[in-house]
């Protein structure tokens, strides 16, 4: 297998750094690495494959000779630079929101719709982290019973706001432990330590946030289910890493909790952790720093009428890895084929 010239746009950020680690862990055939970042990071070096690689300025000409771009920058940077990379012959796998809902851009979770990479026009989008974590376990259940409706509540870690979110939670926890005032709480609207914030991103239609609307919009595109109904509430929680989700799913055909466990036990990217007798269920502490989505608390929705087929489950996954970096590298692996 021939090696690829791989660029990481936003290489010094949390997701960019995780992409580097995932490339090494998965033995992706990197012939040459081109880490790119803003002017303030130029001149720094990044450790990769036993070498120190200098960070280059993220600008159009830097993409000359690049085969694959993994995008870990914000929407504005992605919109400005990734089309320039495509013009120079690169294929871009982008983690920003910039292109996700464009009709000519595949939105891909490899365990679900990996074949969609075949119709890309130079850019492939990585879905939102909460979308990935929720849909990976829902997809095999959909294949068995036909998914109709999702009601989800997400419990999203501070690291979902990047390194500033992680640093702020640590600072606030230290203040709370010392009995000191927390003061300014950016990037969060309120203190997160010892608190929950039922808002992630800005409010949009019908008083839903943009983060809450993503699961429906992205889920319909990824699963090719234009009629899928989704209701989502997103909450920021004082957890360092790994998002959690409580999901009630309605299906066209009957499916029991035992059948769901059996299906999920052999589905790719999933680990069933569902043993209430021994108090075993998914938790952020156990899902951090690895790539599987843990699924448990699988039970019948007892609020549903007898003629409605619905299950409730709880899942957790590392949103920096599978929810972002690992998913992007998996897409890049599909491009090797």
Image (cartoon, rainbow, N blue to C red):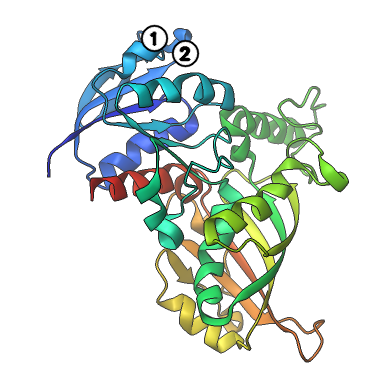
Secondary element at tag 1? loop
Residue 153, position in %: x, y?
Answer: 73, 58
Identify the residue at horizontal 40%, vertical 77% (top origin): 266
Q: Residues within 10 Å of mark 2 (few under 14, many from 20)?
A: some
Q: State yes or no: discs 1 and 2 in contact (Cβ < 8 Å).
A: yes
Give above or below for 155 relative to 139.
above
Q: Residues within 10 Å of mark 1 (few under 14, many from 20)?
A: some
Identify the residue at horizontal 41%, vertical 12% (top origin): 59
Gap in angstroms between the C-alphas marked 1 and 2: 7 Å
295 to the left or right of 148: left
Residue 230, position in %: x, y?
Answer: 72, 61
Question: In which image quadrant can residue 146 be found?
Answer: bottom right
Residue at far bottom of view: 306
Q: Nearer the viewer, residue 11 or 117?
A: 117
Residue at the disc numbered 2: 38
The answer to whether residue 54 is seen in the rendering is yes
Q: Nearer the viewer, residue 170 or 148?
A: 148
Check residue 42 in the rendering and tell me which mark sits there, or answer none.
1
The answer to whether residue 237 is seen in the rendering is no
Give above or below for 284 relative to 247.
above
Residue 320, position in %: x, y?
Answer: 50, 43
Question: In which image quadrant can residue 277 be found?
Answer: bottom right
């Amino acid at each position: 297998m021939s090696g690829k010239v791989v660029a990481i746009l936003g290489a010094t950020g949390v997701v960019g750094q995780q992409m580097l680690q995932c490339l090494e862990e998965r033995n992706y055939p990197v012939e040459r690495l081109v880490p790119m970042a803003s002017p303030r990071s130029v001149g720094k070096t990044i450790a990769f494959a036993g070498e120190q690689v200098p960070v280059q300025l993220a600008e159009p000409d830097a993409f000359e000779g690049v085969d694959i771009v993994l995008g870990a920058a914000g929407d504005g940077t992605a919109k400005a630079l990734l089309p320039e990379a495509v013009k120079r012959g690169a294929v871009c796998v982008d983690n920003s929101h910039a292109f996700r809902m464009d009709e000519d851009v595949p939105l891909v979770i490899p365990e679900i719709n990996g074949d969609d990479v075949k119709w890309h026009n130079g850019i492939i989008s990585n879905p939102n982290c909460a979308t990935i974590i929720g849909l990976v376990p829902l997809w095999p259940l959909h294949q068995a019973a036909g998914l109709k409706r999702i009601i989800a509540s997400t419990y999203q870690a501070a690291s979902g706001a990047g390194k500033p979110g992680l640093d702020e939670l640590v600072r606030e926890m230290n203040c709370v432990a010392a009995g000191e005032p927390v003061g300014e709480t950016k990037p969060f609207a309120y203190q997160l330590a010892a608190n929950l914030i039922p808002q992630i991103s800005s409010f949009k239609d019908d008083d839903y946030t943009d983060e809450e609307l993503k699961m429906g919009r992205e889920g319909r595109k990824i699963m090719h289910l234009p009629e899928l109904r989704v209701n989502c509430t997103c909450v920021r929680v004082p957890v360092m890493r790994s998002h959690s989700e409580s999901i009630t799913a309605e299906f066209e055909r009957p499916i029991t909790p035992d059948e769901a466990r059996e299906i999920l036990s052999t589905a790719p990217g999933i680990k069933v952790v569902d043993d209430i007798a021994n108090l075993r269920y998914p938790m952020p502490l156990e899902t951090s720093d690895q790539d599987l989505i843990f699924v448990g608390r699988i039970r019948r929705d007892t609020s549903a009428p007898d003629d409605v087929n619905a299950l409730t489950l709880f899942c957790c996954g590392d949103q920096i890895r599978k929810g972002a970096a690992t998913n992007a590298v998996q897409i890049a692996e599909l491009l090797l084929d």
